[in-house]
Image: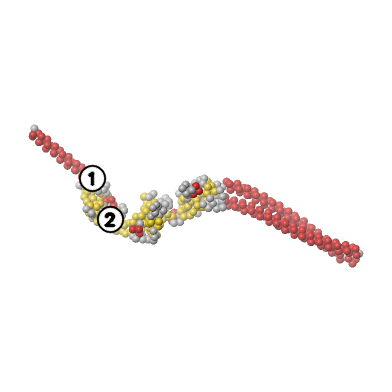
Amino acid sequence: MTLRRAVQSVVTVAVLAGAGFGVMRLREAEAATSLPTAPAKKGEFLVITRCRGELHARRSVQINAPTNVPDLRVVWLAPQNSAVKEGDVVIRFDGSGAKQQLQEKEAALKQAQATLDQAEAEARITAEADRRDLSGAGYDLEKAKLEVSRQEILSAIQGEEAKINLGLSENKLKVQKATVGLHEASGRSKLASLTRVRDQAQYEVDLTKDRLSKMEVKTPLNGVIIYMPNYSAGWMNAKPFKVGDQAWPGATLAVIPDLKTLEMESKVEEIDRGRISVGNDVRIRLDALPELTLSAKLDELSSMTQVSFDWPPTYNFRAYARLADADARFRPDMNGSMDVVIRRIPDAISVPAKAVFTKNGKPVVYVQSAKGYAPREVEVQARNPDEVAVTGVAAGTAVALVEPEVKK
């Protein structure tokens, strides 16, 4: 029994030793195959300063509601953020009321013109009759003068009658001249009054036609249309203008940014302000279009901090980079990152920032081998948010992105 128990003990120990060795080999195999890795790359390393920002257009045009036009109700709008070309109609207002007013104003204009034409005809008739009467009075006066000139051959009574007739003829001519003057003044006054009525009617017709022409608002440049908030319902309930909204004369309805003037406006921390300068190369990435990397130049850098509208408010410098080629998919207020190139390191070895760890106070990378991952000490030349330039590893070396000890 003692020998049997000893044999069983030896077999158990052997089995346990084999199992432990198998588990150790299995863990080594897992460590050698399951960790994510990335190769060390050789090439130019760009030392960058990364900052966040938004796209803004340096030039934009406001679309305002027409002035001196009452009852502006929107009946059609171009789609929000849609591309528009110069001369395209982007907003239409309800013109039915103006069309009805135009018909009424044109009818009033025709009536005023007819009344004026009638008054002009009556004035011509009156002037013609006055000229006839004035000519008759002149004839009577000349006839009376002739009779007076025959006084020597007429009797005394007939001579006195001729003198009386001459005086009457002179008075009649004066009265006729005064009547003609009165008729002319009255005619001019009446015609002037009717002309003013006709001109006022014509002005109202022209004004209504002008209002009708403003029922369609066209864009003055190429770009995208962005509608502004409608504050008629209060600041808390403000929403972009839409079909059916009532607009007030001169209201800012939309803004059209010029896509050719798009630039990235980024916030720069105070610690990075002294590291960058105007003229630095810039790489821009937009969150909505992660597949694109845009090259640009740093055009402008603020010399003083600017306060933000966030709460609590922050103070940052501003950096501006103009986009050389504007894509049709770009829109103002798109968020993105801007990497300002500070320095270039030629023929540098770079690894992902996640592959550099600290061991015993020194930076190391874990190099993949057949038996697992071995730490290798490296020297950091430069560090970026995504990658690190190091010395101590060769190009193409697979380095772990997760620390093996932590993985185990």
Estimate how packed mark 1 is, as few (under 14), some (14 to 19) or many (20 or more) residues with alpha carbons within 10 Å: few
Residue name at image x 68 percent, y 51 percent: 114
**Residue 379: image x %, image y %?**
24, 56
Residue under numbered circle 1: 408
**Residue 247: image x %, image y %?**
52, 49
Which marked residue is nearer to the observer: mark 1 or mark 2?
1
Residue name at image x 48 percent, y 51 percent: 254
**Residue 177: image x %, image y %?**
77, 60
Furthest residue to the top? 1
Q: Quadrant of the N terminus?
A: top left
Residue 316 shows in the view: yes
Give left or right: position of 155 versus 181: right
Q: Which mark is residue 238?
A: none
Residue under numbered circle 2: 389
Separation of marks 1 and 2 at Cα, in angstroms = 28 Å
93 vs 259, nearest the viewer: 93
Q: Quadrant of the C terminus?
A: top left
Residue name at image x 83 percent, y 61 percent: 168
193 vs 137, nearest the viewer: 193
Q: Secondary structure at mark 2?
A: strand
Give left or right: position of 1 versus 126: left
Mark sitting earlier along the chain (1/2)? 2
Q: Amino acid at mark 1?
A: Lys
Give left or right: position of 134 versus 99: right
Q: Amino acid at mark 2?
A: Ala
Estimate how packed mark 2 is, as few (under 14), some (14 to 19) or many (20 or more) residues with alpha carbons within 10 Å: many
